[in-house]
Image (tube, grey):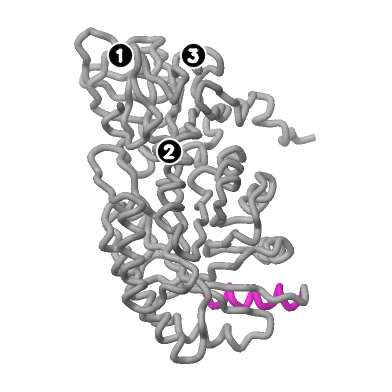
């Protein structure tokens, strides 16, 4: 097994790396590189860990699709019973196209437009996760124009430190997300008086790549304090949404399992007397992160005065996390060589010094070798771009011994098909 990955799907057999029953070598030959390779088994295994832990409760899992929004991934999860957490009208359109259920969909995000709000109301989504007073007024205005009622849940900023990278911490005072804790009760009171608003829940999301249970329990206690206060004022909520953010193992992290996280939060809910409410979670990375790799080929190995470089055909436009966060991504040769490894930086061909996928790695690599960047199922293709006029990679899903192309590689012509020159 791959030591740095928690996925059950990727392992070495007969000297080569496999995804389920298919060698990555054969995928590289068939589909070219760079290509994202996802394991159906790993996605469903990760989802089932949440579903089984909540099976005895009235509950809903809303997959945070910003992690990976490929239609095949969404369809697979929809068929498994998942709802969805969306942050744009485009994501709602993807849910519907993939066979997802709008009535099991929550709409988060600080910048919803009137067009997106109308789109969501017409689709009859479960609720909006409200993030500000102006947003409340906007939703009321759009719902009144449509002569309908908008279901809302307030996303509370509980000011709990998730102990993660500052770019992906979302529950602190200085973050743009959610409603300040002290402002929550006045906002609920205001919403309850609006003719076209129905208050149904409360929500929080404190960050991403969280590797401890304690921040969740701390946030849960703060949210449950608000639930108690709301009920004393006669506002009974139907659901409590504890968000997502559970981390995966990229290097040496030891995040808790989904079951351990849920058990800890449920214990607090029961102790506070709210076990009968619908319990919701919004996992993203922990569902798909370990289920994917980025398959790339070394073009050249360049020996510099101070550093060695394995220049591959994937780049920061394919995988932004290292350049954006300084993130560690584990890298394995698909067929390891026997010679002594050298220390190399794995870099792409983009014209930026920040274009790197891995630094200071002990690798025996030569031009033409296939490399697998592990745990690339989340925030990889979803954040991809066409920088340097590079077509985005192909995506495939492995199901046992079968491989399905679920997104064809872009062509050069497609990059500027919607552009025109001046007259």
Circle on res. 26: 3
Question: For the view shown, which residue lies furthest in the right direction?
Answer: 423
Classify 10 Å Cα crowding around label 3: few (below 14), some (14-19), many (20 and above): few
Circle on res. 336: 1
Q: Mark 2 — residue?
A: 320
Question: Mark 2 vs mark 1: which is more N-terminal?
Answer: 2
Tell me the element at label 3: helix
| Left or right: 311, with 395 as reference point | left
At which x and y percent is residue 28? 49, 16
Tell me the element at label 2: loop
Classify 10 Å Cα crowding around label 2: few (below 14), some (14-19), many (20 and above): many
Taking the spot 55% from the left edge, 22% from the top edge, the residue there is 402
Question: Mark 1 vs mark 3: which is more N-terminal?
Answer: 3
| Left or right: 63, with 366 as reference point | right
Residue 353 lies in the magenta stretch: no
In the image, the segment drawn in magenta is 132-145
Rendered view: 146 above or below 192: above
Q: Picture quarter containing residue 422?
A: top right
On the question of residue 219 being in view, the answer is: yes
Question: Which image quadrant: the C terminus?
Answer: top right
At which x and y percent is residue 55? 45, 57
């Amino acid at each position: 097994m791959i030591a740095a990955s928690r996925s059950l799907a990727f392992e070495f057999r007969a000297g080569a790396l496999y995804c389920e029953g298919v060698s990555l070598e054969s995928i590289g030959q068939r589909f070219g590189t760079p290509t994202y390779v996802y394991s159906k088994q790993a996605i469903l295994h990760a989802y089932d860990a949440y579903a089984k832990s909540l099976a005895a409760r009235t509950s809903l899992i809303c997959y945070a699709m910003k992690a990976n929004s490929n239609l095949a991934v969404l369809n697979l999860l929809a068929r498994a019973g998942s709802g969805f957490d969306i942050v744009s009208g485009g994501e709602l359109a993807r849910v519907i196209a993939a066979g997802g259920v709008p009535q099991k969909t929550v709409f988060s995000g600080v910048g919803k437009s009137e067009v997106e709000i109308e789109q969501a109301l017409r689709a009859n989504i479960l609720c909006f996760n409200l993030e500000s007073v102006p947003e409340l007024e906007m939703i009321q205005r759009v719902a009144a124009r449509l002569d309908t009622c908008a279901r809302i849940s307030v996303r509370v900023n509980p000011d709990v430190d998730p102990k993660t990278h500052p770019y992906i911490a979302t529950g602190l005072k200085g973050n743009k997300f959610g409603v300040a804790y002290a402002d929550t009760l006045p906002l609920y009171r205001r919403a309850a008086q609006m003719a076209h608003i129905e208050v149904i829940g409360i929500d929080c999301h404190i960050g991403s790549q969280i590797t401890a249970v304690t921040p969740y329990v701390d946030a849960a206690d703060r949210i449950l304090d608000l639930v108690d206060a709301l009920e004393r004022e006669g506002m009974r909520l139907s659901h409590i949404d504890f968000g997502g953010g559970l981390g995966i193992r990229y290097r040496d992290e030891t995040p808790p399992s989904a079951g351990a996280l849920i058990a800890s939060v449920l214990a607090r809910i029961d102790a506070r007397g709210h076990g009968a409410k619908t319990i919701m979670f919004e996992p993203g990375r922990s569902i798909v992160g370990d289920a994917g790799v980025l398959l790339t080929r070394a073009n050249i190995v360049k020996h510099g005065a101070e550093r060695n470089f394995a220049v591959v055909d994937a780049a920061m436009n394919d995988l932004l996390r290292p350049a954006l966060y300084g993130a560690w991504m584990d890298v394995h040769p698909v067929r390891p060589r026997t010679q002594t490894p050298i220390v190399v930086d794995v870099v792409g061909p983009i014209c930026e010094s920040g274009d790197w996928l891995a630094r200071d790695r002990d690798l025996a690599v030569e031009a033409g070798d296939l490399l697998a960047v592990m745990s690339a199922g989340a925030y990889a293709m979803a954040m991809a771009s066409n920088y340097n006029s590079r077509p985005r990679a192909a995506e495939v899903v492995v199901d046992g011994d079968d491989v399905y192309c679920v997104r064809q590689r872009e062509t050069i012509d497609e990059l500027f098909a919607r552009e025109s020159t001046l007259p």
